[in-house]
Image (cartoon, rainbow, N blue to C red):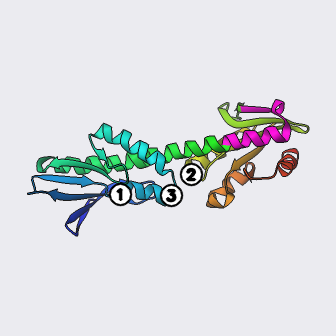
Amino acid sequence: MVTSTLIQGRFRVEMPVVMASGSSATVSVWPEGNGDTFMVSDDGCALFEITAGAFSEQIFRRVAVERCERYGAHFDGGSMLYLRVSAGRLRGAIVAMANLIKEVVDLTLERSLEHKVRQIDADLWDKLERTFGPQSVEKKAIILGESTAQHEFSAVVQTQSGVVAFDTFSAHGSSINSAYVKMADVGRMDFPPRRIAVTKRLSDIGPKLNLLTSVSQVIEISIENRVLQQLADAA
């Protein structure tokens, strides 16, 4: 369902394109000069989605430049994506801008999450090597689940009392679901390794934390090394 409102000389067109936050993509349109050309812009809509979710503005700007080139659109270097078109191209430009907004937001979220996971992986490896010794830590280890699917864990550690599989995850729904699936599948093996899921802040996870606690121990990356060792031995 497409709706539009006129606000201070600009038409704000709400498109049936759902963003990650659940809101709709909003496109702003206004005439230039004598009305022969029109500006079609996100008017900062994409950046608002990014900042509202506390994702990386730096990554947003790189993605905005990249995706605008594909659409023949422009990025002002700050917050606005835009197209300048003739009246005959206006309808198609509005549709294109709505799709561009969604692509920029979705790709920024994806890359931001990848960056966060890479960082927390590095922090985890450092913590594990300091706690158990470098020779005991296997990074990016593959474990076969009960379903015979191969799952990549952030690290596997050989402790005095057995093998412990660690996997990092972010607060994003897809990351939580991925961690749950691999933990649950590996946990159904006849002789499963102990499993510990690691995230930045437990308070960010919300209700889905219960999913992970049902199949693994869940900790914050800031946990003290001595406590980590105790949990690994008792997990």
Residue 19: percent from the left, percent from the top?
41, 54
Of mark 3 and mark 2, the one earlier in the sequence is: 3
Q: Amino acid at mark 3?
A: Gly
Q: Which residues are magenta?
A: 121-139
Nearest to the observer: residue 116 or residue 171:
116
Reply yes or no: does residue 125 show up in magenta: yes
Of the two numbered discs 3 and 1 on the same chain, state the one appearing first in sequence. 1
Contact, mark 3 vs mark 1 (Cβ under 8 Å): no
User: Going from the N terminus, do you reach mark 2 or mark 1 first?
Assistant: 1
Rounded to the nearest whole Å, what is the CA distance between mark 2 and mark 1? 23 Å
Cα–Cα span, label 3 and label 1: 14 Å
Q: Residue furthest right?
A: 160
**The residue positioned farthest toward the front in the image shown:** 77
The residue beneath circle 3 is 53
Q: Disc 1 on helix, strand or loop?
A: loop
In the rendered structure, the answer to whether residue 34 lies left or right of residue 71 reads: left
x and y percentages locating residue 133 in the rendered image = 84, 35
Figure check: 176 above or below 6: above
Residue beneath the point at 22% across and 69% down: 8
* Image quarter of the N terminus: bottom left
Residue placed most toward the observer, 61 or 27: 61
Residue 138, compared with residue 71, is above or below; it is: above
Q: Is residue 142 found inside the magenta-colored segment of the image?
A: no
Q: Which residue is mark 2?
A: 172
Characterize the local packing of mark 1: few (<14), some (14-19) or many (20 or more) Cα atoms within 10 angstroms: some
State the residue at coordinates (84%, 45%): 232
Q: Which residue is mark 1?
A: 44
The reply, left or right, for residue 62 in relation to residue 173 is: left
